[in-house]
Image (cartoon, rainbow, N blue to C red):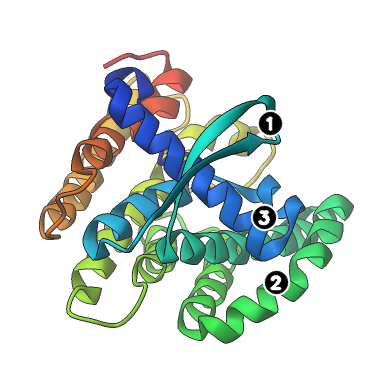
Amino acid sequence: MFGFVTASLDRLSDEQRERYKSCYCGLCRSLKERHGSLARMTLTYDMTFLVLVLSSLYEPLELQGEAPCPAHPMKHRKFRQSSVTDYAADMNIALAYLNCLDDWEDDINVAALAESKLMKSSYEKICEAYPRQCSVIKSSLSELKDIENRREESPDAAAAAFGRLMAELFVLREDRWSGALRSFGMALGEFIYVMDACIDLKNDKRYYKYNPFVHLYGRLDEEQCFRDILEMLLADCVRSFDALPLVQDTDIIKNILCSGVWTQFNRHYGSTS
């Protein structure tokens, strides 16, 4: 359910693109430094978005530099790291660990089980450092599984469960901004869940997997119906974003919210609108 919150790179300036990539590379370095080289395999652009939002709000001291990249060993990549980057790396591992366990339980995926064992020690330490976040992530995923097992016809409950998960990720600490951050994370999580359901509808129907939109499969207006629902959910997300006093990187964040999040949807439905 991750991989949707990315930037439209062609709509960013060279400077913005460099900033975005340096945050991604910084997150990659934090994963390695805190959880080992294999942790880099769990890296997602979704957590880069978390870094951008929380860094813009709290403005932590950043470490900047250049270093070789394992994926591009002949080149040096710029990176930016901070306490927020470390937090995002920890949340990245927590999500990856629980996702692997879910894949093992649902599909008897032996590779996922092996991967979860490699992350178990890190996950336990993260739970000690961030008990609130980890507790909500675990309970939200459990709730989501129950909803899917019941095969509820409405997407509301499932979207809300995933929304609560995302809401807690955005609350780095309980302070004056926690309410606004929870509202933003909740709205974004609901959008992501519904977006994922829209894109996976055909495959879910084919393999008899749960999808709250199965009754819409094959309708002539399927794409427009989904787009209308998603635009409504995204409007709530943008309103919550506007309530946050962000200045740094807002152009990149708005690029992601207004354009990047549609990339997979447009690719799937063959639309460029």
The residue located at (35%, 14%) in the rendering is: 271
Toward the viewer: 264 or 220? 264
Q: Amino acid at mark 3?
A: Lys
Q: Residue at x 56, y 59 (%)?
A: 92
- The quadrant in which residue 97 appears is bottom right
Given the image, on which type of amino acid does mark 2 rest?
A: Ser
Q: CA distance from mark 3 to mark 1?
A: 13 Å
Amino acid type, mark 1: Ala
The x and y percentages for residue 165 are: 44, 67
Q: Which mark is first along the chain, 1 or 2?
A: 1
Query: In the image, is residue 199 above or below residue 91?
Result: above
Label 1: which residue?
71
The residue depicted at 32 percent of the width and 63 percent of the height is 60
Instruction: Determine contact: label 3, label 1, CB under 8 Å.
Output: no
Q: CA distance from mark 2 to mark 1?
A: 23 Å
Residue 32 tag number: 3
> Quick one: SS at disc 2?
helix
